[in-house]
Image: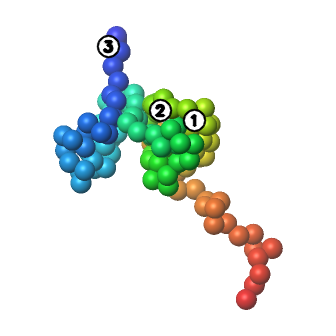
């Protein structure tokens, strides 16, 4: 069976204008669900690591936002004088996040960030 080549870009700036900022996270989450069910690729776009690509330093919110991009098939970055650094940081973030998801579903595996080796931990 042949299918048309189609995908969905979640352009969050435009989406926020259409649905309001209060519903932005909810609607982009539902869009990800619908696209997964329909087997459509998703492009995560609009200001991903935007401050970093322009100034060289990301905001905390940008890091969390970029991590959510792991659930899409593609993440789009804008141009800027520090775009090479932004690509490297995005690659690192997405590589780390891939260990926590399988097909856009959280794996709920062991928390390595909080793991303490009982053999070396101080016992009170």
**Horizontal and vertical percent position of residue 23:** 23, 51
- Give the number of the disc on residue 82: 1
Seen at 32% across and 34% down, the residue is 11
Q: Which residue is mark 2?
A: 77
Q: Residues within 10 Å of mark 2 (few under 14, many from 20)?
A: some
Question: Does residue 91 appear anywhere in the picture?
Answer: no
State the residue in front, 73 or 86: 86
Q: Earlier in the sequence, mark 1 or mark 3?
A: 3
- Number of numbered discs visible in the structure rendering: 3
Left or right of 102 on screen, residue 89: right
Query: Of all residues shown, which one is farthest toward the top?
Result: 2
| Whether residue 43 can be seen here | yes
Distance CA(mark 2)–CA(mark 1): 11 Å
Q: Quadrant of the N terminus?
A: top left
Identify the mark nearer the N-term, 2 or 1: 2
Give the labeled residue for mark 3.
4
Provide residue 72's location: percent of width, then percent of height.
43, 36
């Amino acid at each position: 069976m042949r299918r048309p080549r189609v995908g969905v870009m979640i352009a969050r700036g435009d989406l926020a204008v259409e649905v309001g900022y209060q519903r932005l996270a909810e609607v982009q989450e539902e869009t990800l669900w619908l696209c997964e069910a329909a087997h459509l690729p998703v492009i995560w776009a609009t200001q991903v690591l935007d401050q970093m690509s322009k100034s060289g330093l990301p905001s905390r919110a940008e890091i969390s936002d970029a991590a959510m991009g792991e659930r899409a098939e593609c993440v789009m970055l804008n141009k800027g004088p520090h775009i090479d650094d932004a690509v490297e940081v995005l690659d690192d973030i997405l590589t780390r996040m891939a260990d926590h998801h399988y097909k856009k579903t959280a794996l709920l595996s062991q928390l390595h960030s909080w793991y303490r080796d009982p053999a070396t931990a101080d016992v009170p």
